[in-house]
Amino acid sequence: MSREILPVADKAQVRAYARRLMVKYPRRLSAALALHGLAALSGLAGPALLGGLVQDVADGARDVNVSVIALAIAGFVAAQAVLTRFAVFASSRLGERVLAELREEFVDRVLALPLSTVERAGSGDLITRTSRDVDALSRTVRHAVPEILIALVTGVFMVGALFVVGGPLMAVPSLLAVPLIWISTRWYLNRSGPAYLREGAAYATLTEGLAQTVEGARTVEALGLEDRRRDRTDEDIRGSYAAERYSLSLRTVWFPAVEMGYVIPVVATLFIGGLFYTQDWVTVYQVTAGTLYIQQLVDPLDRLLSWIDELQVGSASMARLLGVANVPDDRAPSGATPDGDAIKAEDVRYAYREGHDVLHGIDLDVRPGERLAMVGPSGAGKSTLGRLLAGIHGPRTGTVTVGGASLVELPLGELRGQVALVTQEHHVFKGTLRDNVLIGRPEADDDAVRQALEAVDAWEWAEKLGLDAEVGSGGVSVSPAQAQQLALARLVLADPHTLVLDEATSLIDPRQARHLERSLAAVLDGRTVIAIAHRLYTAHDADRVAVVEDGRISELGSHEELVEAGGPYAALWDSWRR
Ligand code: ADP
């Protein structure tokens, strides 16, 4: 199922951004370019010196000192090597710096994404963007951009030298190759993008099919599906083969055309230059130097062409990375401040997909300090309502307020101090134990961290590890129950007056459950709790029970009242008890 919720930036946006990046460090960029330029300049000396030598010999000069010229050429080559080394160093440093900033900017963007978008988009797209696209972009920034810059600088100098030393006339023969290279490259680039996409898609299908066969091997055997699976694999291989063959066939056209494009100018310059010489339009010196320049031009041109493909891949990734910033913010802090702790939902409707409301006009007054349980059949909308009451989504119409202020008008930090959603998901971030708790309230001191850990009964093990212990991936491993305690300690630190509990303890290891339930109880103590109850005894212990059915609250009252009333809750309770 395609869940492309996250937008992709358009071409103009990518171009503007790339331009801004290029000129962000003008001094470093000009230094790198100047070094590349100097290296290219040193490379220009060889052909000119050789051309002079040939000219002298042709003129019959007797006092030609070949050793001096050879030494000079060697000197320039050495200078070029040294300059190139520094030039590559300078441009790599610049590239790495730009890349680091790109990454940081992207992380900021992702973190600023509206929660509702993250929830709806699912993690797949974001993970692809943070891994594959960042990798692709790194390759482009690290390799393609410097290579293309070097090729451009070198190419420009070569052409300049060709005009200055060889004369404009010597540049004419190489023009023969321009249409060939231009047309074949355009032809190729227009087709290669879609062809690579097709290759990727065919490969993905093949992998997916194989993985399914392997994962479902027992089922395949049990139902005698071997032939069908084999046929499917064969077909996928055929698809993949056809896709690879197609892009290969594109390259079999482009490569020879371009290679011809490299050779033609050299031959043409030599041949036509010779003709020009017989007409006395140019000197031997010009023909020699010009031909050598043309031959040297092949290298930058080849680099340019081979990295252009990569540049396309990089710009596609950049479009996806920049696109993340195009998600409109779903919270608009209005400066409203809550007056009191009461959470109130009024005529709330919500739709994940336009035109398909899953909540149909919910009114709910949560009394400060009460335990409210939400029960009802699966898919009735309890979790959705829970997320709305925790301010994660804004309602499509209607309002959810705390102390009269709309939840989506509170800044995120402020909101988390009012109401928080507790789910069974808990994550230990890479960093120190202290950092992991401080997420709840970054400015808290060690004393507060200790108290929070004590409150959830985690201080004993936390003290043993030490607040400076590195946890998370690569650090000290923390058990799931401990991870959950850390999450609860964060909550204690953030200190919201209301908690929305969604299946908070259902996945916990039973051996740890008792312990954790105590931690949880400590956190819940003194707060308003809205519990999405999957076990009816939670409802039994609650002050009030809201029965959610088909996106509506069909019953609301205490356990006793509802049992008395003999409605849907009474029926549920009855069947649960039996
Ligand atoms: P409950 O918590 O009572 O089981 P939910 O709030 O999870 O119910 O779901 C209510 C309705 O909203 C269901 O029809 C469900 O399919 C739909 N729904 C829930 N989450 C999403 C989502 N992320 N995208 C689209 N539809 C969703």
Image: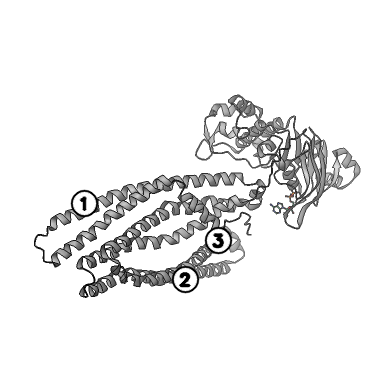
User: Which residue is at a point 54% across and 58% down the rendered structure image?
Assistant: 12
Going by the numbered disc 2, the residue's amino acid type is Tyr
Task: Name the side, left or right, on which 497 lies relative to 282.
Answer: right
In 3D space, how far apart are the residues under numbered discs 1 and 2 (Cα atoms)? 48 Å
Q: Position of residue 106 (x, y in %)?
A: 54, 47
Mark 1 touches mark 2? (CB < 8 Å): no
Label whose residue precedes the other's in the sequence (2 or 3): 3
Q: Quadrant of the C terminus?
A: top right
Task: Name the side, left or right, on which 461 lies relative to 293.
Answer: right
User: Which residue is at a point 88% across and 47% down the rendered structure image?
Assistant: 567
Q: Position of residue 223 (x, y in %)?
A: 62, 65
Mark toward the viewer: 1 or 2: 1
Question: Which residue, given by chain and number where applicable, does mark 3 sit on?
Answer: 208
Task: Name the side, left or right, on which 230 lies relative to 517.
Answer: left
Q: Position of residue 525 (x, y in %)?
A: 73, 30
Going by the numbered disc 1, the residue's amino acid type is Gly
Neighbour tally class for label 1: few under 14, some 14-19, many 20 plus, Cα within 10 Å: some
Mark 2 touches mark 3? (CB < 8 Å): no
Looking at this view, name the residue that lies furthest to the right. Answer: 565
Question: Which residue, given by chain and number where applicable, does mark 1 sit on?
Answer: 75
In 3D space, how far apart are the residues under numbered discs 2 and 3 (Cα atoms)? 22 Å
Q: Position of residue 392 (x, y in %)?
A: 69, 44
Question: Which residue, given by chain and number where applicable, does mark 2 sit on?
Answer: 246
Return the residue nearer the eye: 217 or 368.
Answer: 368
Return the residue nearer the eye: 301 or 367.
Answer: 301
Residue 390 visible to an observer of this rendering: no
What's the colour scheme? Answer: one colour
Mark 1 touches mark 3? (CB < 8 Å): no
Residue 335 visible to an observer of this rendering: yes
